[in-house]
Amino acid sequence: MKKIGKAVVVYYARNYGTLTAVKLALRKNKIAASYVKREKDAAIRKGVAKTDAVIVVGGDGTLLKASHFIEHTPVLHISSSTDKNEAFFARATSKDADMKIRLLAAGRYKITRLLRLEAALNGKKLPFKALNEIYAGSREAYHVSRYTLIIGKRKEEQKSSGILIATPAGSHAWVRSAGGAGLPLTAKKIEYVVREPYVGRLTKPKMTKGVLGSSQSITLISKIWESHEGVVVIDSYKKEFGFKNGDRLVVRVARQPLNLISF
């Protein structure tokens, strides 16, 4: 693989000293680095475009946030604390950061390609790709989400607590907690789960969960009442996109996966 000579480090302020270990390792292995806090969207976008690799120091939330601004650039996730975060995507910790960064400098690493999702709202593509999942439904969990779910030729009116559409990576996160099945990390599949589907006299949903091929898409037409504020959210990030009555959301596999550095 390409030897890494330049990197941008995206970090979470609460990194428990791991950032110091990473800085020392980068300096020792003669990798030029710039440092950006995860809250600085514009700086991340600019830095990613001019580097050999992105190194994320933090938990999975920091990796997910950084991934929204990355296209082709390979990413190494270094967990800031395996005691404080799940570190699902992490391939290094403070204990082995020096050794892993030495391997980066030597080009001795591999790439794991992680499927991502893209979404279009009323024909306009949303700015971020999902590495974990996309949520669509009412903004408040205690408000009913009303929508039409369309998959291929199947179509169903539903009421629920919203719907989750996940990647294989995301199938091990929120979707699994909601009753989904974990998929192999490199699978070319989409999984969806309807959260708490309402079954009553008028609605008896059958399309409540499933796994689709990478060429399939999922369409939702919002019927959410204006007072309930429908939203679309990518990877549980704070940026929300309005999903009002009549809006049409289409979710499909993105052409560009995330290139995760592994060893």
Image (cartoon, rainbow, N blue to C red):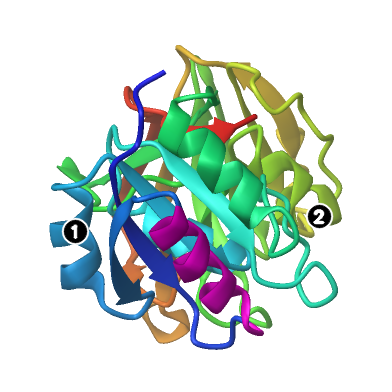
Q: Which residue is mark 1?
A: 47
The spot of residue 254 in percent (x, y) is: 36, 28
Q: Is residue 193 left or right of residue 188?
A: right
Q: Is residue 212 left or right of residue 238?
A: right
Amino acid type, mark 2: Ala
What residue appears at the point 31 percent right and 72 percent down from the top-left corner? Answer: 35
For this orientation, the residue located farthest to the front is 28
The spot of residue 77 in percent (x, y) is: 56, 52
User: What is the quadrant of the C terminus in the image?
Assistant: top right
What residue appears at the point 81 percent right and 48 percent down from the top-left corner? Answer: 176
Inspect this view and state whether residue 199 appears. Answer: yes
Which span is picked out in magenta?
Answer: 16-28
Q: Nearer the viewer, residue 71 or 17?
A: 17
Whether residues under marks 1 and 2 lie with C-beta atoms below 8 angstroms apart, the answer is no
Q: Nearer the viewer, residue 175 or 53?
A: 53
Packing grade of label 1 (10 A; few <14, some 14-19, many >=20) is many
Q: Is the stretch drawn in magenta largely helix, strand or loop?
A: helix
Packing grade of label 2 (10 A; few <14, some 14-19, many >=20) is some
Height in image: 69 above or below 53?
below
| Secondary structure of the residue carrying numbered label 2 | loop
Height in image: 138 above or below 78?
below
Amino acid type, mark 1: Gly
Check residue 61 in the rendering and tell me which mark sits there, or answer none: none
Determine if the magenta segment contains residue 54. Answer: no
Inspect this view and state whether residue 116 appears. Answer: no
Label 1, label 2: how far apart the Cα atoms are: 36 Å
Q: Earlier in the sequence, mark 1 or mark 2?
A: 1
Q: Which residue is mark 2?
A: 178
Q: Is residue 105 left or right of residue 141?
A: left
| Secondary structure of the residue carrying numbered label 1 | helix
The spot of residue 28 in percent (x, y) is: 45, 57
